[in-house]
Image: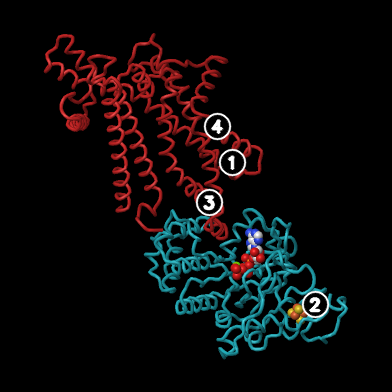
Chain colours: A red, B cyan
Amino acid sequence: MKTVVRRLSGHLARGLAMIWVVTTLSFVIIRNIPGDPVRGQYEKLIEQGMSPDAAERATAALYGFLPKGSLWSQYVDYLNGLLHGNLGQSLSTPGTGVATIIGSAAKWTILPVLGGTLLSFLLGVTLGVYAAIKRSGKLGDALAISGSLLHGIPQYVIGLLVVAVFSTLWPILPAGGPVDIDFAPGFNGPYIASLIQHATLPVLTYALASYGGWILAMKSSVATVLGDDFIMAAELRGMSRGILFRYIARNAILPLFTILALSLGLLFGGAIFIESIFNYPGLGLLLVNSIGARDYALMGGTFLVLTVAIVVANIAADLLYAVIDPRVRKGAEA
Amino acid sequence: MTRTSAPGVRVKDLTVVYKTPAGELPALGGVSLSLAPGTITGIVGESGSGKSTLALSLLNAVQPPGRIKEGSVEIDGLGNVVELTGEELRRARGRQVGYVFQAAQNSLNPLKTVGKQLLDLGRSHDFDDLPALLKDARALLGRMGLDGGRVLDSYQHELSGGMRQRVGIMFALVLNAHLVVLDEPTTALDMITQAAILKIVRDVHHERGLTTLIITHDMGVAAEVTDSLAVMYGGRVVEHGPTTEVLGSPRHPYTKGLIRAIPRLSGDIDEARALPGRPPTLGTIPKQGCVFRERCPMRIAVCDTVDPEPVTRDARTVACHAVGRPATPIVPKEYV
Ligand SMILES: Nc1ncnc2c1ncn2[C@@H]1O[C@H](COP(=O)(O)OP(=O)(O)OP(=O)(O)O)[C@@H](O)[C@H]1O
Ligand code: SF4
Ligand SMILES: [Mg+2]
């Protein structure tokens, strides 16, 4: 238990450091962008006839920190605001808090990414075991080759291919937006069916983008475990095939949990391209749009939330690892 | 289905090859060796002489890139194991033949406790009374100086090298197999523990009436526990006979050299002389003639061209042209 806590606190410390770096970076960017948007906003409001006090408050609401005072005190104000969940106001959608916008976009990213990861993990791991055991068979070869091919294709290219195949060449699935606007939102059949239809291609893209990696990783992991002494020992003791298979699978899957975190991070990053392709209103598209609109507060907030998502994915993957591996769970050096 | 008496084992003309970049090379070049029922046989020989390969052959478990090319391994009650496959072979392993393999320190699944793996073993061999199996395991571990209950609750990484070896021995004995093969079972142990473990192996051997094969680097261990002793060199059994006789009056030049190299057995440290030269590897084992001739002080002309056949006289088998024969060139046909 002690090791788990130690590992966890390590991850937490690193995650917080990463989040801090990202927030500081976005503060520095917003504050130092040519033309200084904060200052600009403040002056614009004054020009529009606002009193300096009112203009100051309005700007603070917009960016989450006050435009006056030393850079340092502005920074402290900004961090303080973040700690209280205040991400500022959106510039491109006046009157709406950044937190609210991000909150409604987050589900469009998190659910498809998790769904795609789960799908590709299960598929890739199963097929990877098969590819490792049937190394010399035709199907095994084909699987390994398909794995390497897919692994090498960038995510956005996979996204474009998926669109080309499933909504242009062979139009069976929608490739734009999260849902048909014809249906009334709510818990009703047509609406949910439309949701699922629209989610299929993005999820498929996420799955395809990471599935090749899983096959390759699982295949090499199984090959390593097959060469381990304890597998031979189990064979020499006449362990049944089912038990042997479980020994192999469980030991081979273990190192993949470290890649799981990496893969989730990659997919969250890939959301930027994939959501743009599918015009899917998640965090990635939000980030792209906020950059286009020079909505710095929204940009910083989205970036921050994506970072938090990656950190949380890391920690979750590590916890899973610890649950499965007694060497970590029970805290030994070996 | 389990035998209640010690099985005899007859290895005949066994050739095992490993695939290497230079083609398939023999690690065992037509080995014949019999284990008499109820005896403890030891195999000694330098590293690479083929001891483990021979031991694995008893379970038809030579690992790729190796394979049994020729020969047979007859075990009473099992038949020729070289011809066993699939479930039949799996069931023989563990249940009929207990095996402690050389890397016994890594013989456990790191993700499961010893006890859980023992239950897996019991289920694999259709044991109904699993609690009794656990009890037997605890008793065996207890005899080897371990806290059985604690060990069964432990993961591999919680056990020391010596403890893991003893767990390996427990796994080989717990199913009550009547043929037990131990490949260097005590290498990770200190002298005192080693002696204690070997005593237990011998006690269990007598109590249960087993046939036991022990592979060791250590002539002292061989002298201590074995009834008969086989000496291997370059994939051949060069001498085999009752342990006291082989050690007391070695006939093969290699056996003589081995014994002279050990102060404890030769009696005097000053007299202990290391064997000159190095043992051959797969690639350097001579393809014809005697495999030992490069290092042999008694080498004669025929040794360069003719591989000496094993010849048995007074319960001793020796493969050497210079033993019990005139040291003159010999027509090979006489000995075929
Ligand atoms: N997997 C393998 N591939 C190629 N050659 C092998 C393989 N396993 C064993 N050999 C070779 O076969 C020969 C016999 O090996 P073996 O392990 O049986 O020797 P050993 O007498 O048990 O040695 P040691 O005392 O070191 O355990 C050696 O020359 C070894 O290099
Ligand atoms: S056969 Fe010849 S070389 Fe080989 S051990 Fe005997 S004397 Fe020496
Ligand atoms: Mg060996």
Q: Nearer the viewer, mark 2 or mark 3?
A: 2
Q: Secondary structure at mark 4?
A: helix
Q: Which residue is mark 2?
A: B303
Would you say the residues marked 3 and 1 are in contact, meaning their CB atoms lie under 8 Å apart?
no
Q: Are marks 3 and 1 on the same chain?
A: yes
Q: Residue at x 48, y 30 (%)?
A: A207
Query: Ligand 2 closer than 8 Å to the CB at disc 2?
Result: yes
Tell me which corner region of the image, top left, top right, bottom left or bottom right, holds residue B30.
Answer: bottom right
Where is residue B75 drawn, in percent x and y? Answer: 67, 67
Q: Amino acid at mark 2?
A: Cys
Query: Ligand 1 closer than 8 Å to the CB at disc 3?
Result: no
Q: Which residue is mark 1?
A: A131
Q: Amino acid at mark 4?
A: Leu
Of A224 and B226, nearer the camera is: A224
Q: Which residue is mark 3?
A: A225
Chain letter, disc 3 residue:
A
